[in-house]
Image (spheres, rainbow, N blue to C red):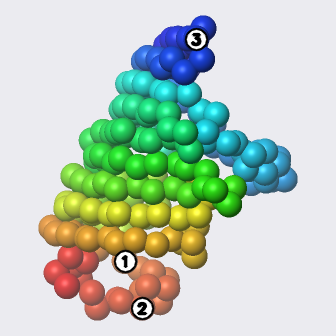
Amino acid sequence: ITGSLYDPQKKGDVWLGRFHHIYLSAFKKSSSRQDQLNAAKTIDPRKIPPIKLDIGDFRYGKKDLGRIDLETTKRHDGVKIDTLQIQSAAYGVKLTGSWLRQADHHQRTTIIGRLILKDLGQLMQRWDITNMLAGGKGDIGYALRWKGAPYQFKLKNLNGEVRVNLEEGQIVHIGKKAQTELGIGKLLNLFSL
């Protein structure tokens, strides 16, 4: 970590962070990860101060997430995400949202935004997901909400809408194992559907 964090002396003032880079090790799959997640469940979004964060280069494990800019404001019931922008060579994200504690003491996260894909194949390779895609660009718009904190995202709890527009990508390096697993061996161009 290289940068600075301004911790205001006055409650309610904005925490300012400016970092050249932040490189974090990925969680290892172990009971300590579960312990960390359990501890995080106790975070009350109403107690999070307003934040303005600028990270020039953020990496988590082997994932190069790119440049991150985050601005939040405090609400009586939690945090409003005024803007979260992430920029890298392969993609860009821009979103707004909220993380609130409701009257029944349950938390709810809402995000509305857009993911712009400049090179889906490159992104999938960088994140060690697959090397079977080449190229691919497009955008994904979304308005999503789920019960829980932002870090408690689970597909089964997800509600909302997603709009996907992808083009100019190809499936490459498809072997027999991949053909069997995917069940789409005859599909030559992922985005021609």
Q: Position of residue 169 (x, y in %)?
A: 21, 68
Disc on res. 85 = none
Read off the residue under disc 1. Answer: 174
- Mark 2–mark 3 Cα distance, whole angstroms, equals 59 Å
Q: Foreground mark, 1 or 2?
A: 2
Q: Nearer the viewer, mark 2 or mark 3?
A: 3
Earlier along the polypeptide chain: callout 1 or callout 3? 3
Q: Position of residue 97 (x, y in %)?
A: 41, 49
Q: How many marks?
A: 3
Question: In what element is the residue under mark 2?
Answer: loop
Q: Is residue 39 shown above or below 73? A: below
Image quarter in which the N terminus is found: top right
**Which quadrant is the C terminus positioned in?**
bottom left
Q: What residue is at 44 percent from the left and 33 percent from the top?
A: 73
Nearer-the-camera pick, 9 or 114: 9
Amino acid marked by disc 1: Ile
Q: What kind of residue is marked 2?
A: Gly
